[in-house]
Amino acid sequence: MRVIPSLEPHRIPVRAAAFLALLASGHAAAQMDDAIYNYLKLERFEYEGNGDIHLFKWDIEGWIGSDYNKLWVKSEGDYVFDQNIFGRADLQLLYSRNIATFWDAQIGIRRAFEPERTFDAVIGIQGLAPYFLETEAAMFISENGNVLGRFKLAYELLLTQRLIAQPRIEINVSADDIENRGVKAGITEFEAGLRLRYEIVREFAPYIGFDYVEEQSLRAHKHSVRAVAGIRAWF
């Protein structure tokens, strides 16, 4: 009588076991790659001011998608309390594709609400540079063919497990003078500052700090040092 071999684990040949393990790991990786996640972060949600200037500023971003493909939404701007107006405000909708470890390329549109209502095309890159520098760069091309850019750089220094210092730089530039926006060619806004935050929990942290801000327009050249206080949160 013919005996059918047992399929118990110790009887499976080593090569077959390795092949099955490879298939299982590949299937698990595929499932991880295809999984849908979402994320929302209030990077800056703050008061900024000094004796002459009183602003509310926000920098919010979120995404939904997989490890390789995401849909991003970003908004940044400020509201001037004294004048009851928005100084700058925009909303971006972007498709993001992972192109390297820690780096995504992004393309989409921006709706600028202030100082001028317009639609801009967006091409950008976002990721983690060497030495853990959080980097974001974007080019905006307006309906009229004007080219603008925005560059951000930030670094987190852990003083304790909960107390974190974050120096950051943001630079806005324009390739040309833009009369209807009052924008002057070159660096239109330079902002460098330091924020010290305390993580009550990892997802929620109040902070204080300061910013040095320099603004160049067709009408004026201003610079000032401002105190900041706000919250940083993510979900």
Image: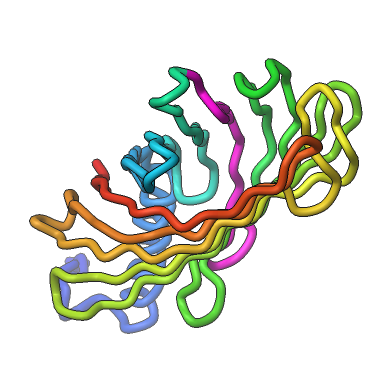
| Residue 124 % position (x, y) | 68, 48
Q: Along the horizontal axis of the image, is 180 left or right of 201?
A: right
Residue 76 position within the rendered picture, expressed as x and y whole percent measured from the top left: 50, 36
Q: Is residue 119 magenta?
A: no
Question: What residue is shown at x 63% (from left), y 49% (from top)?
Answer: 222
Instruction: Looking at the picture, tell me which residue is in the foreground, 27 or 87.
Output: 87
Left or right: where 37 falls relative to 104:
left
The residue sitting at 61% across, 65% down in the picture is 100
Q: Is residue 114 left or right of residue 51?
A: right
Give how far across and how far down residue 11 sits, in percent.
20, 78
Q: Considering the image in quadrants, where does the C terminus appear?
A: top left
Q: The magenta stretch spans which residues?
A: 85-103
- In the rendered structure, does residue 94 fall within the stretch colored magenta? yes
Q: Is residue 217 above or below residue 103?
A: above
Q: For the point 75% across and 49% down, which residue is it?
A: 173
Rendering quarter of residue 201 = bottom left
Q: Is residue 5 above or below residue 44?
A: below
